[in-house]
Image: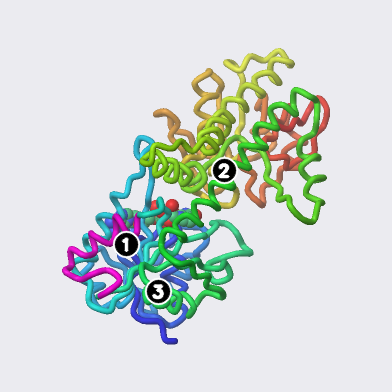
Amino acid sequence: MAIPTTCVVGLGYVGLPLAVALEAKGARVVGLDASTARVRQLASGRSGIEDISDDQVATAVARGLSVTTDVNDAAEAAVYVICVPTPLRQHLPDLGAVEAAARSLAGVLKAGDLVILESTTYPGTTDEFLAPILEESGLKAGVDFHLAYSPERIDPGNATYGLTNTPKIVGGLTPESTRAAAEFYGAFVDQVVTVSGPREAELAKLLENTFRHVNIALVNEMAVFSHELGIDLWQAIDAAATKPFGYMPFYPGPGVGGHCIPVDPSYLSWRLRTLGYQFRFVDLAQDLNNRMPSYVVERLQLLLNDRGVALSRARVLCIGAAYKKNVSDMRESPALLVMERLQRLGARISYHDPFVPSVELEGVHHESVTLDADQISAADAVLILTPHDGLDLESMVQSARLVFDTRAVVPPVEGHVYRL
Ligand SMILES: NC(=O)c1ccc[n+]([C@@H]2O[C@H](COP(=O)([O-])OP(=O)(O)OC[C@H]3O[C@@H](n4cnc5c(N)ncnc54)[C@H](O)[C@@H]3O)[C@@H](O)[C@H]2O)c1
């Protein structure tokens, strides 16, 4: 099937790869973003995200991908895919960007168009929240235009699974909407999985992320008591993972970050609270994961203490500021929470992150330092938080006085290298 002219709304981590993939498949694509700065950046051939290179953007733009802030430039599209942010504001879902995007689309929507929401959100958003705004166009959802939900499952930095080889879940408002959305994705995604409606598709995405959130909390709690019991949890996890069925390994760390794991389960618990129901699993997982940054600081403080160094006078070199390896995304990064806490307790912190040139920690500006032997040996402790690929951690360990490794990426050495 020839892909119809498509408007991708929101050109960030989710929308840009989609727009570039569609363009590469020969589709005419209009990228619509509310940010003038973002549109300028893309128009000048700069990607701004790791999974898409500047070259890819420049090529797509040269071949006809148009980027704009004006919805009227997208009036010719037959498919609109909404990929705008859905953050939390004071622990509550903030659908402001979805609302604004939908309102602008209502001004250009035509009979026969297909609108798909990809932003992560609570079950009921597509039919209860999005449809009425789009219907301000005077057209009826599921009757005059197709409407579907299809969660984005992109994993930034993942070199194995990307847009086309990760199955795409689709749930339309009506069977015709499901069919239209499945046909659209079928043109450029290897496998499309249909469910009976948008709510099932919305819940599938939240189930995936809540599952991850809860299991990370489980191993984080285990990390705390394993340390007390003198057990190497990492070995236990790897041993358990040899079971070929019924188990999937998750690993402890300094906390959870990004726009998904710490945020998405709250969308579900918010929805359940509207029914008077408390989602206890999520609340507990949040408690456990949220305590990890201060637990990491406490463990480091004890290690320094053993060497007669007070944290308030210690130089601590932190490795990695992004929320996970191989990306520059710092949203909800636990590494920043750890660094902030260290700074608040008086430690003289520095950090190295090849993806993050500078950070502001409670009003204090820090720039990523060069990871050389002088820098490393000057630190009382090196704290590994986000170990990007390509960092020479083995030789860093040689020069370090003390290493606290929260990701188990270097072998433990008694008296020198410690694990979470
Ligand atoms: N990043 C991921 O790994 C990932 C994975 C799966 C799902 N998601 C979900 O996808 C959605 C988008 O996330 P993201 O990471 O791409 O966000 P992002 O912040 O990287 O990009 C969003 C873009 O939307 C633009 N925007 C905001 N309001 C707009 C509006 N009204 N009209 C047009 N453009 C608007 C912003 O300027 C920005 O460029 C969120 O719901 C997120 O939870 C993200």
Q: Disc 2 designates what residue?
A: 213
Magenta span: 125-143
22 or 36: nearer the viewer: 22
Residue 73 sits above or below residue 302 on the image: below
Depth check, mark 2 against mark 3: the one in front is 3
Residue drawn where x is 78% and y is 49% of the image: 241
Q: Which residue occupies the extreme front position in the image?
A: 276
Q: Disc 1 designates what residue?
A: 39
The answer as to whether callout 1 falls within 8 Å of ligand 1 is no
| Image quadrant where residue 294 sits | top right
Could you say where residue 366 lies in the image, as x and y percent from the top left? 48, 34
Q: CA distance from mark 2 to mark 3?
A: 32 Å
Could you say where residue 87 lies in the image, as x and y percent from the top left? 38, 46
Residue 76 sits above or below residue 106 on the image: below
- Give the numbered dot on residue 75: none
Q: Residues within 10 Å of mark 2 (few under 14, many from 20)?
A: many
Q: Disc 3 designates what residue?
A: 175
Numbered-mark total: 3
User: Is residue 137 found inside the magenta-colored segment of the image?
Assistant: yes
SS assignment for the magenta stretch, majority: helix
Q: Residues within 10 Å of mark 3 (few under 14, many from 20)?
A: some
Could you say where residue 345 lies in the image, as x and y percent from the top left? 53, 18
Could you say where residue 45 lies in the image, as x and y percent from the top left? 40, 67
